[in-house]
Amino acid sequence: SGPNHPWLMKYYKQSVPRPFATTIAEELFQNNFVPSDTDFRIFRSYGMVPGLDMAHSLNGYVYHTKYDTYTNLERRTCQTTGENILALTWALANAPELKSPEDYAKGHTVFYDYLGWFMIFYTEDTGIILNITISVCAIVVILSSVFLMTRATDADSIKRVVIRFITIFGVQIATIAVAVGLTFLIAVAIDGIGASECWYSETWLIFGLYFCPMFFVMTFIPAIYIRWTKEGTNMRLDDTLACFMHSHCLILACICLTMTGLSIRSAFFPMIAIFFYTISVVLNIINGLWGKKYLYLPIHLACQLLPFWFYTYLTLAFLKIFIPMQGRDGPTSKPEFLIAGLCAIMSIHFGGFILPILNRFRKSKTFLSLFGVICLIFIMIACLPTGFPFEKDVAVQRVYVLHTTRTFYDERGFVYRNESGFYVQPVDRRSDTLKKSVFQNAEPKSVLEEDCNTELLCGLPLYNSRWRDWKNYSRWIAAPIPHLPIPTEIELTFKTHITDTRVRYGFSLKSADRVVLYVDPYPNTTVADWSFDLTPLKSKFPTPYFVYHFYSMDDRPLQFWIEMDRGSTDYEGATLRLGIGAHFLYHEDQYTEEFKGFLDEFPEWSYPIDWVASFESRIF
């Protein structure tokens, strides 16, 4: 939503019959946690037009593939989208704010739906008040509950009750730390043994790999503490379990207040758990005064039902969104850490007030140990063929394949290297899955490393700036020269001395409709100015600069200039390296038989995204 313009979410809440929206997703997207962008960005960033951005999140495996068709779109999703858009468009078209939207631009909102049934919406200021009020009330209610525990025992044991509660608070902090630590340790192990993304198509593996270790530690450590201290206290088991849950609520309250202080609107997330637990504590205090302590557990579990549904609903939603995204997040990504972190956060919120109750059962430790056993079994399954992440037509492995010709020129304009081949760029963590098939004839990685040390961005036609981080995982397979629809023509149109140290170079470039320029100043020189957007220069982006240019109807040569500062009047020699990567998408009629044959070699569970490209390196 937005940015800003809180009135937009007001009409979304009022009009949409089946809402699906959360501030968490908005903040994750705006802080680049999502490896995608939106066409709405152009209106937002350049037209300053506010709006609501919506997307389908179900079956993200087909995103930007040949499977992304209307046939594979869930019909109910299509119907829901139409109903929502129609109602929202009607509401916005009649909104009085449209007369002067700039008057309503200020402010942010907190919003989230409950199981798709209804929306909860309020301003950021209201959210701050709610978070602080509920957190403070929770602390007061918990301290009151602990005080009443001291009233229920001998007067001489008041000090012991307080000490026991403080000790349990420390144990609970340690429990969460160990649980999260073990979960991430498993993620490190899975990634280290090369089994990353084992859950990509078999999503049920996530339960055993990352939820079960959280459940195991969050139940087992309290069970050990209860067993060790059983003889030294006269506190009832329910009171001991209540102390663990009180401690968990205090931890969430601290998290909520911290997030609120950092102006993170998603602080509503822990606030909901705090709110419902506080209600259960108040009701049980009243129930205790009535003397019906046997109702403690039913009251507590009844109050946990709504938040449990909410957190598990969001857990499912975020897993549905983020699991397919890991197939295109790049070979440098850490998908295990992301999924492990997501499972840990969700477990802390929906499990912290339910898992301790398991200690009320007989032979509870035997039951709790099942979580640990399940985790070990799932780790073994992840290492078996069952844990192979990709599946034909369901969850394919994406990989970019560019039939490329590369030409390198020296300072005098002579070609010192000219070669062609298939440039293969993996886009997920499992970049080694093709080594027994299409990578069999690939050049050794040491050759690529040498190119990366000597040539501009490894001498590869990177398609976008994200590929800069991925290039070290690419492979090169020598092949005959491709057919290019048009050759790249770069001409130095002028060279003008602006000052004693500044020289302006003018260029005319005729190339593909999608072309990438690498601008790399030589040592002791800098790019002082150019005809492109000045943001990279003013913000001191690292070199080489990465410029992406594309055109549609206007195919006239691109005219641009670059002004170099040599730093000294005595400077001699070249000042600038210019890389030109031309990308010819949608030219399958130009594919050679060798390229078609190479694409046929890819396994059925992979999905090559292919086109023809060229790269030239020039020195000026």
Image: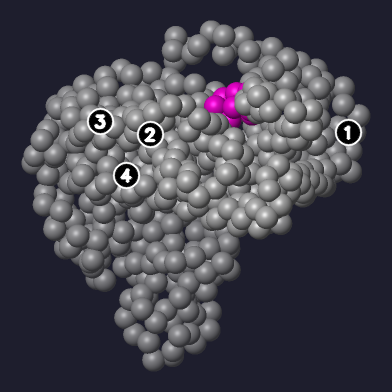
Observer-side mark, 3 or 2, equals: 2
Residue 23: percent from left, percent from top = 66, 38
Q: Nearer the viewer, residue 13 or 164?
A: 164
The answer to whether residue 523 is visible is yes
Whole-Å distance between the Cαs marked 3 and 1?
Answer: 58 Å
Q: From the viewer's perspective, is residue 570 above or below residue 289?
A: below
Residues at circles 3 and 4 in contact by the CB criterion of under 8 Å? no
Which tag is nearer the camera, tag 2 or tag 4?
2
User: Reading the chain from its start, which is encountered first: label 3 or label 2?
Assistant: 2
Mark 3 or mark 1: name the one nearer the start of the chain: 1
Q: CB under 8 Å between callouts 2 and 1?
A: no
Name the mark on residue 186: 4
Q: Earlier in the sequence, mark 3 or mark 4?
A: 4
Mark 1 or 4, closer to the camera: 4
Seen from the viewer's position, the closer of residues 531 and 315 is 315
Residue 339 coordinates in the image, percent (x, y): 42, 39
**What residue is disc 3 on?**
377
Mark sitting earlier along the chain (1/4): 1
Distance in Å between CA atoms under marks 2 and 1: 60 Å
The amino acid beneath tag 4 is: Ile
Q: Amino acid at mark 2?
A: Lys
At a point 49% along the width and 65% down the height, the residue shown is 541
The residues bearing labels 3 and 2 have C-alpha atoms spaced at a distance of 18 Å
Tell me which segment is drawn in magenta: 303-314
Q: What residue would you read off at disc 2?
A: 365
In the rendered view, tell whether residue 11 sits above or below residue 462. above
